[in-house]
Image: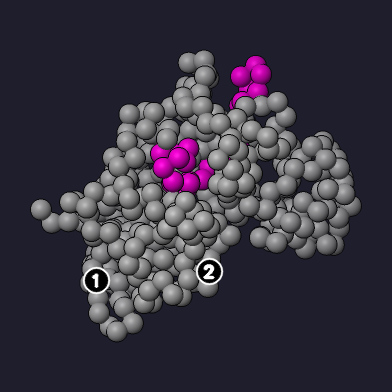
Amino acid sequence: MTRRRVAVLFGGRSAEHEVSCLSARSVIDALDPERTEVIPIGITREGRWHRVASPPALPSETGRMPEVTDGSGGTVELAAEGVSAQIVAADGSRESIDVVFPVLHGPYGEDGTVQGLLELAGVPYVGAGVLGSALGMDKDVQKRLFVAAGLPVGPYEAVRDSAWVDDPETIEAAAEALGYPLFTKPATLGSSVGVSKVYDTAELAAGLEEAFRFARDALVEKAAEGAREIECAVLGNDDPVASVAGEIVPQEHAFYDYEAKYLDEHGARLVIPADLEPGVLEDVQRLAVAAFRVLKCAGMARVDFFLFAGDELWLNELNTIPGFTSISMYPKLWEASGVSYGELVERLLDLAVERHEAERKSTGARALGG
């Protein structure tokens, strides 16, 4: 049997570099070596691609979070060769690839940039396309689209860094109108990087300055006080399906921050499946699939909600490349739905090829000789 050659991309230039490495390790470990030949490609924080000899090391193995450095291996480039793609090493040697799994979180990986490169190379890749990835990365734009589609979104304001410098009083007034406590966050980042919970005007200023360290646009969101944090996973292309729902119960943290997610093993308790009434679960699943369709996603997404007493739901955000470690919510939700981690990874690779082949049959692709 011919093995499928899968390039796994990880690391990257965003502040979620380490999380990407952790996710990639789990994906690589899950791939069946009898069916798949893995080509691990680490991307440094400066954007250089390296063909590495082994998957990223775990903190339990090294005592620190993993990262990709220039010492990881020889640099490589991606090149198109006819209707296929190849990895080209510095010495000119080439390796063909069948499909790419971009396990990249945040800007320069989850925002449509790498997806555009892979489109130009003509190679199938896991996850949303260029548009879906860009929409999913920008939390302001996705919320605007959710509102336009009639999906329930909590109160928020979008803030540009230049607007904060030029007219902070207007933004402070908008925050007062939303009502404290509030959350400030970068509009184009994940993993709770740059997120602050603020209780007054002074903390609002500090929270926005922290958010602007990572992006030019920030969100000021009404805190969902007393609400439960519910997440649902979506899988598929044209006919997406939703998993069971899960609940995040933070432990000794003000909210589900970066430390609670990745550094403190007791930072949060994941309840899977969540204890929900059947009608509420159906609403969560319906809204998750609706959000997936609104943002033109493909392959996978995790959709996050707040659930209030009285069963009111706020759609918080959608992530097109959710955390993919073996203990992350997305794979655990599918495991609880009857799909093992290994089966999930294989299904995502199949969906990547399926979408690529369908798009190559379009009129535009035929006109280009695809």
Residue 63: give x, y in percent of width and height. 51, 56
Q: Is residue 50 magenta?
A: no
Q: Which residue is mark 2?
A: 45
Q: Is residue 313 magenta?
A: yes
Position of 246 with respect to 81 (left or right) is: right
Q: Quadrant of residue 7?
A: bottom left
In the picture shown, does residue 303 fall above or below 360? above
Position of 26 with respect to 259 (left or right) is: left
Q: Amino acid at mark 1?
A: Glu
Callout 1 environment at 10 Å: few (<14), some (14 to 19), or many (20+)? few
Which residue is rendered at x = 56% and y = 62% of the image? 14
Q: Quadrant of residue 306?
A: top right
Position of 132 with respect to 337 (left or right) is: right
Residue 331: give x, y in percent of width and height. 41, 39
Q: CA distance from mark 2 to mark 1?
A: 24 Å
What kind of element bears circle 1?
strand
In the picture shown, does residue 258 fall above or below 287? below
In front: 351, or 322?
Answer: 322
Residue 303: give x, y in percent of width and height. 51, 38
Q: Is residue 262 visible?
A: yes
Q: Is residue 118 visible?
A: no
Q: Which mark is residue 95?
A: 1
Q: Quadrant of residue 210?
A: bottom right
Rendering colour mode: one colour
What kind of element bears circle 2?
loop
Magenta-drawn segment: 307-331
Residue 249: give x, y in percent of width and height. 60, 30
Callout 2 environment at 10 Å: few (<14), some (14 to 19), or many (20+)? some
Q: Amino acid at mark 2?
A: Arg
In front: 182, or 115?
Answer: 182
Which residue is rendered at x = 68% and y = 35% of the image? 252
